[in-house]
Image: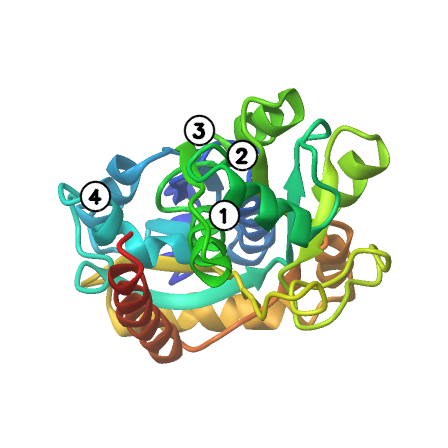
Amino acid sequence: RAAGFGPGLANQRVTVVVPFGAGSVTDILARIFADEMGRKWHQQVIVENRPGLAGTGAVAKSPADGYTLMLTSNGHTVAGLVSKDAPFDPVKDFAGITRIGSAPLFLITSPDLPANSLKEVIDLAKKEPGKLNFSSPGLASTTFIAGALFRKAANINIVHVPFRSAPDAVTAVMRGDAQLYFAPVNLARDQSKAGKVKAIAAATAKRIPEMPDTPTFTEAGVPFVYDSWFGMLAPRNVPKPILEKISKDWADALKSPELQDRLKKQFLIGVSDTPEAMDKIVKSETENLTKVFKEAGI
């Protein structure tokens, strides 16, 4: 039996593992998902933060019964690249369920960095190779990928510094311990208005209405668009009907104006896919990023 299947299952809880710390976009989406599915399934759905590759590895080894799920970012697809000792294969050890949402990202800098535009950031990085660094909540995070791809697109040498959580990574930029970070809209807007960071450019195809004065990377001279996603996975051998039900239930939930409003307040875009589509996304992105990272020597 599995999540939401049959009577009498309210006594067995569903655990959604998040391989990042509390306060990250992944964590926020997981809690929204848990609230929605808990009501729909009439059973307890909890979120468990287990930062790092060990958390993902634990999910891969969990019973394939639908009671242990994982909400992760597309950083999952580079896990095998950033750690030769990763205790799982990002494609072979997991079954796709659905993407949950996406979040536009902005490049922010520490307030005391002597650069106020993307050109000035790049010029500074080229003047002093290896001196600037970018923070992230971990090697297999969407912000890490954004930073690594930006480094390649701009042809600059900036150093990655991983932290235990997204709040820690952001605080490091505010303090000046790190210089760069790829932040979601709400954080970039609020902290730049407060003067705690500087919002430099949006990694989007078009400007974001909430921050109309911040140019896109392309407008600022670097043709760089990065679409992050956050998706639900399960251990590889979970039966297909279970995966399909969870996927369908999330797609149905997205029809709710209340859920759409909740996502909008977090500057998130709700997304849904079939399990087959999610499998293809993970496989194709793993192959693509493996090629990109190897070419870039990352």
**Contact check, label 1 and label 2, Cβ < 8 Å:** yes
**Contact check, label 4 and label 3, Cβ < 8 Å:** no
Q: Earlier in the sequence, mark 1 or mark 4?
A: 4
Q: In the rendering, at what x and y percent does residue 132 appear?
A: 50, 35
**Contact check, label 3 and label 2, Cβ < 8 Å:** yes
Residue labelled with disc 4: 83
Cα separation, mark 1 vs mark 3, equals: 11 Å
Question: Which residue is painted at 58% across and 33% down in the image?
Answer: 179
Q: In the rendering, at what x and y percent does residue 18 appear?
A: 42, 42
Cα separation, mark 3 vs mark 2, equals: 7 Å
Please tell me how crowded label 4 is: few (under 14), some (14-19), or many (20+) other residues with Cα within 10 Å: few
Q: Nearer the viewer, residue 271 or 187?
A: 187
Residue labelled with disc 2: 166
Q: Nearer the viewer, mark 1 or mark 2?
A: 1
Q: Earlier in the sequence, mark 1 or mark 2?
A: 1
- Element type where label 1 sits in the image: helix
Q: Which mark is residue 163?
A: 3
Q: Earlier in the sequence, mark 4 or mark 3?
A: 4
Does 265 appear above or below 220? above
Q: Amino acid at mark 4?
A: Ser
Q: Nearer the viewer, residue 211 or 118?
A: 118
Residue labelled with disc 1: 143
- Element type where label 3 sits in the image: loop
Q: Earlier in the sequence, mark 2 or mark 4?
A: 4
